[in-house]
Image (cartoon, rainbow, N blue to C red):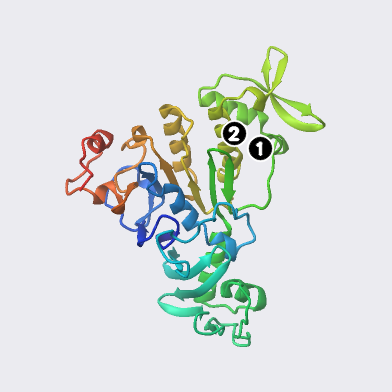
Amino acid sequence: MITKFSVSNFKNFKNKLTFDLNKSKNYEFNTNCVDNGTIKKALIYGHNGVGKSNLGFAMFDIVSHLTDKTASKEIYKNYINAANSKDTIAEFKYEFNFNGISLIYEYGKTDVETLVYENLKINNSDYASIDRRNNNTASFNAKGTENLQTDIGKSKISILTYIKKNSVLTDSIENECFFSFIEYINGILFFRSLEQNNYIGFEQGVRGIAADIIEHDNIEDFQGFLNEAGIDCKLRRIEDVNTPSLAFDFNGNLINFYEIASQGTKALSLFYYWFQRLREKDSLVTFLFIDEFDAFYHHTLSALIVKKLCDINAQVVLTTHNTSIITNDLMRPDCYFLLNHDGLHSLADRTPKELRKAHNIEKMYKAGAFNG
């Protein structure tokens, strides 16, 4: 799992911002939100313009150079913080723990496609590195890379991708950790439904939500999901210009789902599209980030979605403006984070007060208990 992330000089993050998922407390409730001391389910609250979306974009920047998954270039316009000079490097640092083995990956970019330097350490030992500001020569210490050409030339390729595609790594703890890292990055997923649907990672290309639900034979299940969410409806399959789609069934009168569905119902359909993958027993999703996950939801529906996400295996981060779900009934104080111009800290770290399950932490938040 990812245990810590930091970024600087990227979009609105001129100074270094750190998201520390290793600072869990010893709460004895909602223990499924933490795994071996690492926060596994987190919710980030913050006012408009503080960088909640940009944090997600920063964490998923890694997708563009380590995977062949979808990574929208539109999202990564205005890459470098505007207050810095054009030759400034955006810097990213990821820390992971895989079966007790630590892995730290750092890199710098001038834009989403241009890597300046990379450094990968496993158990505090150098595994691979390059700094193109000095020369184009990489350093490899992984077992099985002894015969790799170290002169990368003018290639923009990540040296980690270079290792993966051009070497036969031999058995070692470090190489096993490296493969776990690559598998984890290939399983990360960001999505949101605001002005338009966006996603980063996990899959390639664009698919229709209705067609996907039909293909997975999940029309009845999707109907049940909507009913559980408080939307009383019946769904049927229709052929829309020779393409299978969904329709609401009003006593035999069929109307295309997307012609009359509310914005909230459409947002739920997007959530359900991905939830099909998330709830699979052998789901390949490792890390999920949903930006403004409940922008179109009633607060009771927001709570339902959080409960469902707390039951999946993947590590989850959500962003929201909705204070009603800041409650110990859903998660716990060390899993709720506040993002503002002072940084990103959990509720548990923003007060000297000992927080208990009985505390109404939403009421405390509104009273300013976590401003310090």
Residue in the foreground of this view, choosing between 130 and 188? 130
Q: Which residue is mark 1?
A: 209
Q: Is residue 41 above or below residue 321?
A: below
Q: Of helix, strand and loop, which one carries label 1?
A: helix
Which corner quadrant of the image does residue 160 belong to? bottom right
Could you tell me if the residues under marks 1 and 2 are in contact, i.e. CB atoms within 8 Å? yes
Which corner quadrant of the image does residue 161 belong to? bottom right
Q: Is residue 277 above or below residue 214?
A: below
Residue in the foreground of this view, choosing between 297 and 73? 73
Kind of residue indicated by mark 1: Ile
Q: Which residue is mark 2?
A: 269
Q: Residues within 10 Å of mark 2 (few under 14, many from 20)?
A: many
Residue at screen point 79% across, 28% down: 239
Residue at screen point 22% across, 41% down: 356
Residue in the foreground of this view, choosing between 172 and 243? 243
Q: In the rendering, at what x and y percent does residue 284 appear?
A: 58, 53
In the picture as drawn, the residue positioned furthest to the top comes out as 251
Q: In the rendering, at what x and y percent does residue 130 appear?
A: 52, 80
In the picture as drawn, the residue positioned furthest to the left comes out as 353
Give the quarter of the figure containing the N terminus.
Answer: bottom left
Q: In the rendering, at what x and y percent does residue 263 appear?
A: 55, 29
Which corner quadrant of the image does residue 168 belong to? bottom right
Q: Residues within 10 Å of mark 1 (few under 14, many from 20)?
A: some
In the picture as drawn, the residue positioned furthest to the bottom comes out as 147
Residue at screen point 66% across, 33% down: 218
Mark 1–mark 2 distance (CA, rounded to whole Å): 7 Å
Q: Left or right: 328 with respect to 96? A: left
Q: Of helix, strand and loop, which one carries label 2?
A: helix
